[in-house]
Amino acid sequence: MTSPAPAAPAHRPADRPGAVLLVGMSIAEAVRRDELLRTAAAHRASIAFLQQADPSLSAELTRLADTGTGTVVVIGLRLAASGPAHSWLRRIAAHWWRERAGHRPELLVATRLADSPDAVGTVAATTKAITGEEPGLTSAAWEDVPGHRHQVLVCRGPRCAAQGAEEGLRALVRRLTEQGLGDDDVLVTQTGCQFPCNQAPVVSVQPDDVWYGKVDPAAADRIVTEHLTAGRPVESHRLPRHRKEHPTDLP
């Protein structure tokens, strides 16, 4: 008498393959795409990005679903000092799952983010399924333009990334925290190339229209304590700004 075949795991239909998806959470992973690809290859995974790079998480989930994938294990990787919280990985995955027409694979999302390539395997061991009951993409708290006094734009373009932008960003965030300045005071935004690449790493402060170059951790610390806290731009790192006036400029 032939023994019955073992049952397929409850989370994976027997006739559909499974997949692993490694998701870059911040612009840091977009800049370090080759590293993300190497990490994904080690785990036989594909890649996607939550923001600022392609393929997006939604696009890659659609591709996997269209190929008949039964289960997708989603693992977020964040290498930067700041970026979207883990909850956004679930929000975006759940939004896609709710909106998907046709076959939907089971989505198993790791319960925490990996903070290094070496942590991916450990993080992947604990997951939680998407049910469709997760919070949506809107909230009353996100209705209005924020009231911060300054927005600090940290360039994460190729040259700035290669010359230490991440270290400056970490120092900036750390000093803001020490000064008790949150998003309602200073909104830190990572950007693509801001163009004066020879001055990398570049940081600009708006609405003051002040641009800084060669922003290492020491310079980042001074930008917080002297400019953002005391209102005095750091002249030693300030870049000349030659702005062309235009008739449509707002007062």
Image: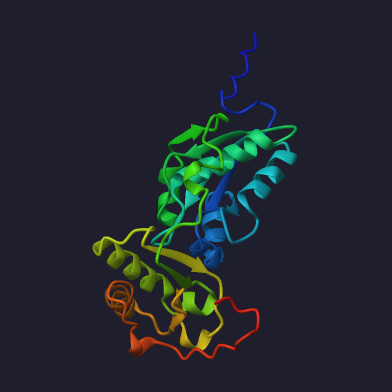
Q: Residue furthest top?
A: 1
Residue 83 x/y as whole percent: 45, 57
Residue 125 x/y as whole percent: 44, 38
Q: Residue at x 64, y 84 (%)?
A: 246
Indicate left or right for 182 with 204 as reference.
Answer: left
Q: Residue furthest left?
A: 178
Quarter of the figure with residue 17: top right
Residue 161 x/y as whole percent: 48, 74
Residue 73 x/y as whole percent: 55, 40
Split into 4 quadrants, where in the image is the N terminus?
top right
Q: Say if 191 sits above or below 50 in the image.
A: below
Chosen colour scheme: rainbow
Split into 4 quadrants, where in the image is the C terminus?
bottom right
Nearer to me, 37 or 220: 220
Q: Residue furthest front?
A: 251
Indicate left or right for 49 with 226 as reference.
Answer: right
Indicate left or right for 65 with 125 as reference.
Answer: right
Nearer to me, 167 or 73: 167
Indicate left or right for 230 with 22 as reference.
Answer: left
Q: How many marks?
A: 0
Nearer to me, 166 or 41: 166
Nearer to me, 187 or 73: 187
Quarter of the figure with residue 178: bottom left
- Residue 68 in sight from this viewpoint: yes
Q: Residue at x 50, y 46 (%)?
A: 88
- Residue 18 in sight from this viewpoint: no
